[in-house]
Amino acid sequence: MSNKGIGFNRILKGRWLDYTAAATLETADLPTLRRDLHDWLADDISSESRDRTIDILLRTWVKTGENHPELLACARELFLSVDSTEERIWLHWGLLLLAYPFFRDAVSVVGRSARFDQPISRSTITRQLASDLGQIASLDVGTGRTIALLKDWGMLDPIVPNRTYRVRNGALVTTNHELTLWLLACALTAHASKAIPPEDLVALPELFPFRIDIRPREIRRSDWFETARYAAGELVSRRVAIRGD
């Protein structure tokens, strides 16, 4: 990943993502969306930072459609039907996994730490990412922005006074299986391995905030996936979309 490839270099808030998602349902015209977001964010962000923040918001809720049109189209349909702010997080998270490989890498580190109830910090996440990605100048900035978003969503509890965090108990839940399967489709699409066992898919560390109540047979029946049996078991992969997702 190049320095430019990190991209996740501005503070984001959940309500900004909510507003962007809603705005994209009103118009697909990028100049109109930019003007709308500039006006709406004026009280929250200085003018010199607003453009780059809007770039991230639009890359998430508009430009993911360039490579993953069906996933983005489904996200917009689901946004109209979800019942809570928490369920909207599922949608933002899936699109961020697609839009920003760095975000996926960073939250995977958090998820692996959460499995063992280990405290995490900006410096430890950055060091681990650097061991995989190399020393990149903007790595620490991207890590800080990721932590800020997780805090805004209430996923991290600070451990005072040593600037570390623990993942908050209580996974995000939904009874909407269509939403859950969509998130799994995003996670598998963003994953380096395009085919993995179904039990590994539902347990990916980058999905740590969510309780995935999906059985293997539901994955097999979903239009998002196809499964193949091999000697040691079963692999699931993304189904090739008719419209080129």
Image (cartoon, rainbow, N blue to C red):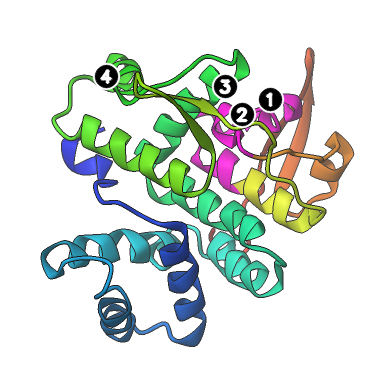
Q: Which mark is residue 204?
A: 2
- Marks 4/2 in contact by CB < 8 Å: the verdict is no
Query: On the picture, is 132 further left or further right than 95?
Result: left
Q: Quadrant of the C terminus?
A: bottom right
Alpha carbon distance from label 1 to label 3: 16 Å
Q: Is residue 37 magenta?
A: no
Dot 1, how many residues are within 10 Å of its Cα: few (below 14), some (14-19), or many (20+)? few
Q: Which mark is residue 224?
A: none
Q: Image point 79% across, 42% down: which residue?
A: 219
Alpha carbon distance from label 3 to label 4: 20 Å
User: In the rendered image of this protein, does residue 26 appear above or below residue 154?
Assistant: below
- Marks 1/3 in contact by CB < 8 Å: the verdict is no
Residue type pointed to by label 3: Ala
Q: Please provide the residue range marked out in magenta.
A: 186-209
Q: Quadrant of residue 85?
A: bottom right
Query: Disc 3 on helix, strand or loop?
Result: helix
- Which numbered disc flags the more N-terminal residue, 1 or 3? 3
Residue type pointed to by label 1: Asp
Residue wearing tag 3 = 114
- Which numbered disc flags the more N-terminal residue, 4 or 1? 4
Query: Disc 2 on helix, strand or loop?
Result: loop
User: In the rendered image of this protein, does residue 3 appear above or below residue 51?
Assistant: above
